[in-house]
Amino acid sequence: MFNSFGNILKLTSFGESHGIAIGGVIDGFPAGIEIDFDAVQKELDRRKPGQSKIVTQRKEPDTVEFLSGIFEGKSTGMPIGFVIRNTNQKSKDYNHNTNVYRPSHADYTYDKKYGIRDYRGGGRTSARETANWVVAGALAKQLLSHIQINAFTSSVGDIFMNKPYQDLDFAKTESNIVRCPDEVSAEKMIAKIQEIRKAGDTIGGTITCVVQNVPVGLGEPIFHKLHAELGKAMLSINAVKGFEFGSGFCGARMKGSEHNDIFNTDGTTKSNLSGGIQGGISNGMDIYFRVAFKPVATIMQHQETINSEGEATEITGKGRHDPCVVPRAVPIVEALTALVLADFWLLNRTRKA
């Protein structure tokens, strides 16, 4: 299995949803960086379950324990090891599907590929794994203190926040439980999620991410393009079904005369339909992209399915699950964005050394 992400800055993670702990090793993190432990924990707190009435009620403190690579509050340049203990598993909630495949989960594909699967919450395929990514991303943010990364919920179901990001106050993103910086849209989104949850169903949505103060020159022109690596990172998140940056799919309806970003004399552009990336390389303008999340696959309704013997059977979801994963995924999107950018930043620094 591929359990590592990154090139110079690399995260290798481990653990299962209902195991003793999850964790990881971060290699390539530069020496001498003062670590803000509170900032790392704050990012984990944004992702953790049980934080509001519209997310799963699994209660996990998600407290990170650093094991190596940090001495007297600073990185040593050695591998940074960490663990996050699992403390609130309810594995009995999954006894009903020991040999039954949940629709739209990884149960069937995982079982066919490996011949064995951890049915307790999906094991390694669980979104609990993303807590590891948030730890690594929080450290990457501290490498990139000059770059601002702001993600937010931009839609839930058919409710869209249609304001351009330039008109938003990102400080308001954390002011509501759905993490939408527009208060009017946020209220509608929260009401929608509560309605869906009451019906025993789930719903999807989108997250928009804006990256500002990005230096020119991050990314490679052929097989290691900046937008390709961002897309790879976002499509690695559980439940993600789509990624677009800049004008995205809307650009397919435009003419070149409408879409071209005309230069100013200082190298900036009058418009930014390129989304801050041209030829796979950052051009210094804002990078912005949107990530689409499907509805959570576990629903509290009766469904037809099959078991490991290929026999038709039935299943009804049990346990504690998000009716909409989007609010908790906001810090995950930011974390992976930081990891990608930090990796490219270190690559450029290596070349200049």
Image: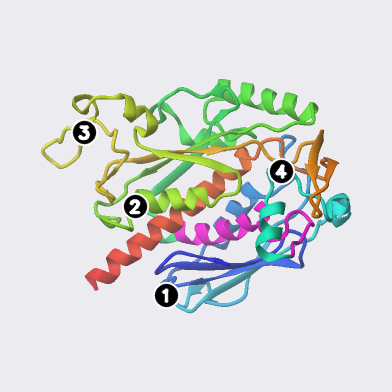
Checking the image for residue 261, the label placed there is 3
Q: Using the image as rendered, state which of residue 66 and residue 288 is in the foreground.
A: 288
How is the rendered protein coloured?
rainbow
Q: Nearer the viewer, mark 3 or mark 4?
A: 3
Disc number lying in front (1 or 3): 3
Q: Nearer the viewer, residue 276 or 264?
A: 276
Q: Does residue 144 appear anywhere in the picture? A: no
Q: Is residue 206 magenta?
A: no
Q: Which mark is residue 31?
A: 1
**Residue placed most toward the observer, 302 or 14:** 302
Q: Is residue 148 above or below residue 134?
A: above
Residue most toward the left? Answer: 265
Instruction: Judge from the rendering whether residue 31 lies leftward or rightward of residue 282; answer left or right.
Output: right
| Residue at image location 32% in from the left, 39% down from the top | 275
Q: Residues within 10 Å of mark 2 (few under 14, many from 20)?
A: many
In the shown orientation, is residue 116 left or right of residue 217?
Answer: right
Q: Position of residue 204 (x, y in %)?
A: 62, 33
Q: Which residue is mark 2?
A: 226
Image check: 190 left or right of 276? Answer: right
Local SS, label 1: loop
Mark number displayed over residue 51:
4
Q: CA distance from mark 3 to mark 2?
A: 18 Å
* Magenta region: 116-141
Which badge, 4 or 1, is on the more N-terminal residue? 1
Quadrant location of the N terminus in the rendered image: bottom right
